[in-house]
């Protein structure tokens, strides 16, 4: 059963990534038709993020009540309906309306699938599955690009909506394959527990892990969003080259997660997190090095490679750090915090870049990295007793 379900979960992770870059790819064509301003894409994005945070926090309750299979199927269906709604929108307010179900569906399925994999599969699958998200995020703009070449951005949304509807049907027919949320990788039974945020924050290590997650997603989002601007404004590289180099940051994450799946067979989650942090530090040093464009190019890729193992490894060790009973509640809290970091911090750096200097880019990343490292080490000290290790 597990062997039949795993390819489906991989497919679901690809589907998670498919819509993520659509708005950015299509917006230059969309906003003129809707009488909107160029900057209004941020409003749609903020609505999606807010709803994703809310649904992540509610994912434990839904997962316990319905099971992961149904939550996944219904969430993908909700996303498909929202994408279809986007394709028929002719006014900006309609986009804002359809952004609500899109965000609600995305948060629930993301948290549910991540927790399910952390309970039922080895660490390598978590890395490979997040690699599949990168594949989906890369395919989405290609589909939209072909639709735009045909003269209609609506076709891109409809194509991906159809793919999501097909996946929904497959998921509904596969419900019997999903294990109960009361079983783990070794088949042991347990009772899932719904915990409130104040209750979770009282557990040892929770404050550290949510700060660590906030920092990681803030670093990843800031590094990706402002890489091209830094290359152009601070380093004098032409805009076309800078854009292609910035894309290599995401390529580094995707390829890195494929490689990390093999490394996790020999290295545990804690050391994979340390490895990622070390690579990010090396990448920042290369970006700062006054040795020409070659080191900047290498630095961006290295930062991407460093980002690769951190997110999957933190998620995968959640049942170990906090107990499988509360792992669903913890996964939802962690992912909600992650969305907050990726939503708020890149605009903060934008303010610094505008009013201070874009050259702060690597130093800003370094400051976030230091805080993330401190929080990760504190987390593992506070949860060492769960892994049978001596505590300080």
Image (tube, grey):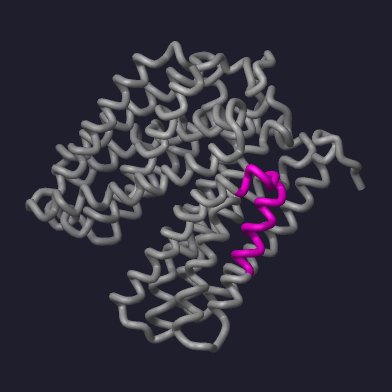
Tell me if residue 276 is in the magenta stretch.
yes
Q: Residue furthest left?
A: 151
Q: Residue at x 66, y 52 (%)?
A: 273
Task: Give the main secondary structure, helix, strand or loop, of the magenta stretch.
Answer: helix
As rendered, which of 134 and 53 lies closer to the eye? 134
Q: Residue at x 35, y 28 (%)?
A: 76
Q: From the viewer's perspective, tell me whether residue 92 is left or right of residue 106.
A: left
As rendered, which of 181 and 131 lies closer to the eye? 131
- Across and down, in percent, residue 170 comes to 32, 21
Q: Residue at x 56, y 74 (%)?
A: 362
Q: From the viewer's perspective, tell me whether residue 148 is left or right of residue 265.
A: left
Q: From the viewer's perspective, tell me whether residue 51 is left or right of residue 287.
A: left
Q: From the viewer's perspective, tell me whether residue 358 is left or right of residue 369.
A: left
- Across and down, in percent, residue 320 comes to 72, 33
Q: Residue at x 49, y 39 (%)?
A: 53
The image shows residue 7, relative to residue 353, as above or below, that is above
The image shows residue 289, relative to residue 2, as above or below, that is below
- Across and down, in percent, residue 107 comes to 45, 35
The image shows residue 123, relative to residue 215, as above or below, that is above
Tell me if residue 133 is in the magenta stretch.
no
Q: Which residues are magenta?
A: 263-281
The image shows residue 163, relative to residue 369, as above or below, that is above
Q: Residue furthest top?
A: 176
Report how many numbered discs are placed on residues in the image. Answer: 0
């Amino acid at each position: 059963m597990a062997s039949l379900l795993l390819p489906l979960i991989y497919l679901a992770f690809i589907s998670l990534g498919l819509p993520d870059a659509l708005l950015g790819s299509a917006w230059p064509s969309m906003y003129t038709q809707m009488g909107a301003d160029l900057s209004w894409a941020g409003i749609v994005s903020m609505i999606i993020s807010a709803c994703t945070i809310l649904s992540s926090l509610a994912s434990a309750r839904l997962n316990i009540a319905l099971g992961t299979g149904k939550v996944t199927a219904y969430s993908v269906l909700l996303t498909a309906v929202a994408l279809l709604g986007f394709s028929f929108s002719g006014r900006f307010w309609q986009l804002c309306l359809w952004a609500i179900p899109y965000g609600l569906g995305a948060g629930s399925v993301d948290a549910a699938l991540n927790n399910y994999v952390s309970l039922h599969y080895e660490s390598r699958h978590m890395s490979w599955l997040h690699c599949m998200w990168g594949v989906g995020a890369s395919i989405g703009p290609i589909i939209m690009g072909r639709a735009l070449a045909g003269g209609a951005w609506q076709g891109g949304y409809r194509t991906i909506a159809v793919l999501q509807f097909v996946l929904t049907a497959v998921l509904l027919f596969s419900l019997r394959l999903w294990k109960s949320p009361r079983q783990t990788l070794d088949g042991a039974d347990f009772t899932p527990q719904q915990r409130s945020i104040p209750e979770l924050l009282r557990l040892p290590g929770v404050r550290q892990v949510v700060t660590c997650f906030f920092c990681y997603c803030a670093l990843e989002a800031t590094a990706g969003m402002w890489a091209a601007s830094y290359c152009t404004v601070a380093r004098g590289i032409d805009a076309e080259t800078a854009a292609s180099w910035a894309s290599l940051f995401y390529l580094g994450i995707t390829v890195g997660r494929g490689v990390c799946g093999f490394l996790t067979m020999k290295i545990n989650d804690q050391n994979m997190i340390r490895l990622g942090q070390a690579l990010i530090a090396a990448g920042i040093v290369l970006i700062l090095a006054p040795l020409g464009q070659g080191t900047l190019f290498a630095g961006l890729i290295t930062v991407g490679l460093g980002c690769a193992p951190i997110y999957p490894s933190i998620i995968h060790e959640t049942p170990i750090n906090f107990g499988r009973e509360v792992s669903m509640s913890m996964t939802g809290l962690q992912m909600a915090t992650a969305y907050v970091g990726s939503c708020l911090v890149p605009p903060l750096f934008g303010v610094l870049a505008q009013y201070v200097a874009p050259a702060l880019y690597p130093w800003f990343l370094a400051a976030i990295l230091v805080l993330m490292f401190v929080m990760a080490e504190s987390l593992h000290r506070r949860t060492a007793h769960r892994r049978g290790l001596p505590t300080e």
